[in-house]
Amino acid sequence: MRNETKKQIIFRATESEAQQIKENAAASGFSMQHFLLNAALKKEYSLAEVKGFAVPVIAELHRVGNNLNQIAHRENIGKKWSKSDLIMNIERIEEICQYLKSLTAAQL
């Protein structure tokens, strides 16, 4: 890959716009340059890229997956869940869903 000459681009923003840009870049976990390039080029961020969002979401999704896998495994080997076990797992999954919704709402 050949090295391209880097070009500097300068633009003006109000004090409040500049502050908002700095805050958004910091919240994204990216450098100012990376954040602005991606925004200007309309590059979509994947959830895995957004540091403040990805870690808790991935952890919670992992927990949901574990719960669902436990339920499926027991059903597949013919073991039945007690009513209290099923209720406990369903409540935990509902808690996780509520947590994920709150994270999503906070990011919007």
Image: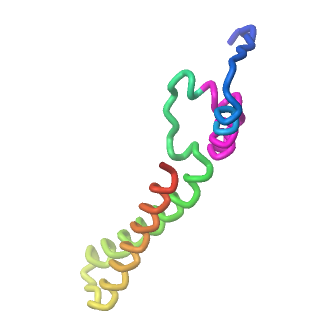
Per the image, is 32 magenta? Answer: yes
Residue 89: image quadrant is bottom left
Query: Vertically, is 8 above or below 21?
Result: above
Residue 82 vertical position relative to residue 41 in the rendered view, above or below? below
Location of residue 72 with respect to 31 vertically, above or below: below
Here the colouring is rainbow
Region rendered in magenta: 21-37
Q: Residue at x 69, y 38 (%)?
A: 19
Split into 4 quadrants, where in the image is the N terminus? top right
Magenta stretch, overall SS: helix
Task: Write the residue at 24% across / 81% down.
Answer: 78
Q: Is residue 27 left or right of residue 77?
A: right
Q: Position of residue 8 (x, y in %)?
A: 75, 13
Decide whether residue 38 is among the magenta residues.
no
Q: Residue 66 placed where, x, y %?
A: 43, 69
Q: Toward the viewer: 33 or 46?
A: 33
Q: Which residue is drawn at 72% across and 16% down?
A: 10
- Count all numbered tags in the image, as a single digit: 0
Residue 39 falls in which quadrant of the image?
A: top right
**Position of residue 67 measured from the top left corner of the image (x, y, whole percent):** 40, 73
Q: Which of 39 and 63 is in front in this view?
A: 39
Q: Residue at x 63, y 28 (%)?
A: 36
Q: Is residue 81 left or right of residue 28?
A: left
